Image (cartoon, grey):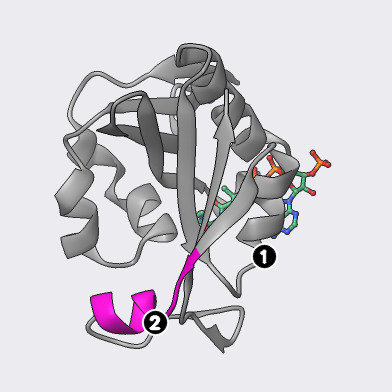
């Protein structure tokens, strides 16, 4: 497995993008921004991706991170975050937003992020259908950040 930058067509990775964010409309808003890294297997398929976009002076945000189900829990998600941390200049503020029910907050904390803001009702206001994860409805967006 190696981490590569994906410079070709991003539309090839819809399955992964939708695993992280089930709304195509939301994904389309950032799909062509920033840089896209992928975890490439020996047979050259992409087992995971991370899409990071600039959101302000010296501020970047991880907008989409997903690892295919069969590859989850093997360190790939963390390796993708580390590749982003390595690539951005020291002093950059790196942000990420995630739901409050999936346990992803714990994943990001283990990658060095700290919670700093909650947007109440984000998933209710911005998604046409109720969104469920692990059997619970996603309501609030939790924002985390770290300074690289
Ligand atoms: C979230 C996701 C990217 C994590 O990737 P992964 O490859 O499965 O995670 P890793 O194996 O790299 O885990 C890294 C660390 O996070 C921890 N971790 C992973 N998932 C966690 C969870 N739900 N809660 C708490 N800790 C978690 C692991 O225990 C591990 O800790 P360690 O370094 O101390 O051993 C992956 O599960 C995924 O793609 N999920 C579906 C899509 C999604 O929810 N994307 C995120 C949207 S914000």
In the depicted structure, whether residue 111 falls above or below residue 125: above
Residue 140 location (% of width, % of height): 47, 76
To which quarter of the image does residue 58 belong?
top left
Can you say which quadrant of the picture contains the C terminus? top right
Residue 49 location (% of width, % of height): 44, 36
What residue would you read off at disc 1?
103
Front residue of 78/114: it is: 114
The answer to whether residue 78 is left or right of residue 129 is right
The answer to whether residue 83 is left or right of residue 16 is right
Residue 146 location (% of width, % of height): 58, 35
Front residue of 43/102: it is: 102
Label 2: how many Cα within 10 Å (few below 14, some 14–19, many 20+): few
SS state under label 2? loop
Q: Is mark 1 within 8 Å of ligand 1?
A: yes
Can you say which quadrant of the picture contains the N terminus? top right
- Residue 64 colored in magenta in the image: no
SS state under label 1? loop
What residue would you read off at disc 2?
121
Q: Earlier in the sequence, mark 1 or mark 2?
A: 1
């Amino acid at each position: 497995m190696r981490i590569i930058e994906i410079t070709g067509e991003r539309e090839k990775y819809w399955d992964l993008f939708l695993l992280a964010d089930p709304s195509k409309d939301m994904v389309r808003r950032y799909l062509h921004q920033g840089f896209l890294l992928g975890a490439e297997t020996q047979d050259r398929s992409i087992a995971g991706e991370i899409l990071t976009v600039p959101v302000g002076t010296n501020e970047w945000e991880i907008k989409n991170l997903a690892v295919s189900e069969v590859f989850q829990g093997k360190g790939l998600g963390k390796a993708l975050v580390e590749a982003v941390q390595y690539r951005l200049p020291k002093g950059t503020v790196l942000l990420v937003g995630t739901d409050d029910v999936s346990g992803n907050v714990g994943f990001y904390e283990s990658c060095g992020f700290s919670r700093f803001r909650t947007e109440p009702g984000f998933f209710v206001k911005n998604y046409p259908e109720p969104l469920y994860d692990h059997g619970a409805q996603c309501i609030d967006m939790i924002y985390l950040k770290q300074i690289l």
